[in-house]
Image (cartoon, helix red, strand yellow):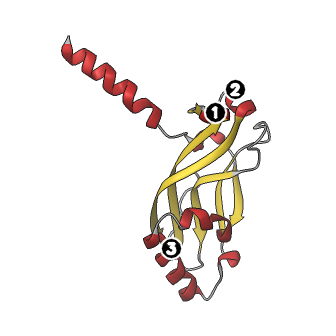
């Protein structure tokens, strides 16, 4: 009995930390790497690697095109906004950035899934914990 109570408590404690599943948005959209500056700034190592890749490619952040998942127009406040995963083409190599996405509305209400209430009331996107991978092959979109 004690184990069941402990398992239930753990499940309740962990569930608010779940990230919003951006793959369910179903749309992709392009953006310049420069738009990802706030995300890049969250990791000094990622920023250094991107700066090095820009030097190698002799390009600037606004010359690099990335793709990300896009909130469709049904999202009252977030329609058109982009979220990870992001894929950026540096010419000879690709950068794939994954993030934990949190969607919130008034008074910090967290939306963990696509629902009519989320589409109507969500007004803030927070992306944290960037992880990334470099590859010479184009990554599959949204994966």
Extreme residue toward the top, this view? 1
Q: Which mark is residue 26?
A: none
Residue at the image position 50 percent from the left and 53 percent from the top: 128
Q: Which residue is mark 2?
A: 117
- Determine the CA span between mark 1 and mark 2: 14 Å
Q: x, y percentage for residue 89?
A: 60, 71
Place residue 26 in its image quadrant: top right
Q: Does residue 118 appear left or right of residue 102 in this picture?
A: right
- How many numbered dots are placed on residues in this image? 3
> Looking at the image, is mark 1 or mark 2 nearer the viewer?
1
> Looking at the image, is mark 3 or mark 1 nearer the viewer?
1
Residue at the image position 64 percent from the left and 33 percent from the top: 107
In which quadrant is the N terminus drawn?
top left
Q: Which mark is residue 107?
A: 1
Residue at the image position 72 percent from the left and 32 percent from the top: 121
Q: Are marks 3 and 2 in contact (CB under 8 Å)?
A: no
> Looking at the image, is mark 3 or mark 2 earlier in the sequence?
3
> Looking at the image, is mark 1 or mark 2 earlier in the sequence?
1
- Determine the CA span between mark 3 and mark 2: 36 Å
Q: x, y percentage for residue 110?
A: 58, 33
Q: Residues within 10 Å of mark 2 (few under 14, many from 20)?
A: few
Q: Is residue 99 above or below residue 58?
A: above
Q: x, y percentage for residue 126?
A: 58, 49
Residue at the image position 67 percent from the left and 71 percent from the top: 34
The secondary element bearing badge 2 is classed as helix
Q: Which residue is mark 3?
A: 47
């Amino acid at each position: 009995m004690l184990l069941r109570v402990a398992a239930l408590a753990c499940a309740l404690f962990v569930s608010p930390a779940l990230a919003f599943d951006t793959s369910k948005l179903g749309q992709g959209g392009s953006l310049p790497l420069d738009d990802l500056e706030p995300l890049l700034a969250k990791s000094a190592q990622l920023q250094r690697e991107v700066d090095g890749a820009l030097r190698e490619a002799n390009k600037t952040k606004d010359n690099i095109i990335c793709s990300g998942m896009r909130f469709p127009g049904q999202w009252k406040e977030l329609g058109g906004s982009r979220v990870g995963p992001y894929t950026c083409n540096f010419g000879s190599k690709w950068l794939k950035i994954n993030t934990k996405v949190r969607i919130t509305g008034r008074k910090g209400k967290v939306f963990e899934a696509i629902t009519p209430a989320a589409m109507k009331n969500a007004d803030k996107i927070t992306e944290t914990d960037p992880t990334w991978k470099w590859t010479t092959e184009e990554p599959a979109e949204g994966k």
